[in-house]
Image (tube, grey):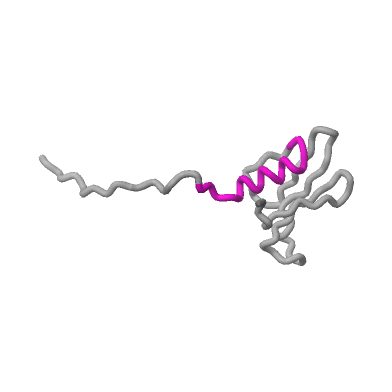
Amino acid sequence: MPDPRFELTKITETEWLILDHRYATNDARQTVARIYRLDTVEVEVLWLRELPLASYYMSAEDAFDDLTRFSTPSRAKPPITIVHRPPLSATA
């Protein structure tokens, strides 16, 4: 089941918003991105937060999927165990 935190909302035939439901409707931080269709196979994303994600995608859904992947912590690997050893003795 997809994370209900984010929502992709179509506002016109060529524009979408990505909303973050962690914030209230009247909070400006709720809007994560504005997406504009450039042509039939490309959209431009204006991220309204500092995110290391692309600015161009093939569709609004691709941008939305990229954000949800980026925001979901990976649980595929167990935590790395750090081995603790005493300090090396100084021998002269």
Q: Is residue 25 above or below residue 47?
A: below
Quarter of the view holding residue 3: bottom right
Drawn side of residue 53 relative to residue 91, left or right: right
**Residue shown at 19%/44% (left/top)?**
88
- Image coordinates of residue 60 in percent, x first then y, are 77, 43
User: How many numbered marks, from 0 up?
Assistant: 0
Q: Residue furthest left?
A: 92
Would residue 38 be counted in the magenta stretch?
Answer: no
**Residue shown at 72%/40% (left/top)?**
62
**Residue shown at 72%/60% (left/top)?**
30
**Which secondary structure type mostly characterizes the magenta part of the structure?**
helix
Q: Is residue 19 above or below residue 92?
A: below
Would residue 74 be counted in the magenta stretch?
Answer: yes
- Image coordinates of residue 77 in percent, x first then y, are 46, 44
Q: Is residue 25 above or below residue 1?
A: below
Q: Looking at the image, which is closer to me, 35 or 69?
A: 69
What is the quadrant of the C terminus in the image?
Answer: top left
Q: Looking at the image, which is closer to me, 58 or 76?
A: 76
Q: Which residues are magenta?
A: 57-75
Q: Residue furthest front?
A: 1
- Image coordinates of residue 11 in percent, x first then y, are 85, 52
Q: Looking at the image, which is closer to me, 61 or 90?
A: 61
Q: Is residue 88 above or below residue 5?
A: above
Drawn side of residue 50 relative to residue 35, left or right: left
Q: Residue furthest right?
A: 13
Quarter of the view holding residue 41: top right
- Image coordinates of residue 40 in percent, x first then y, are 85, 33
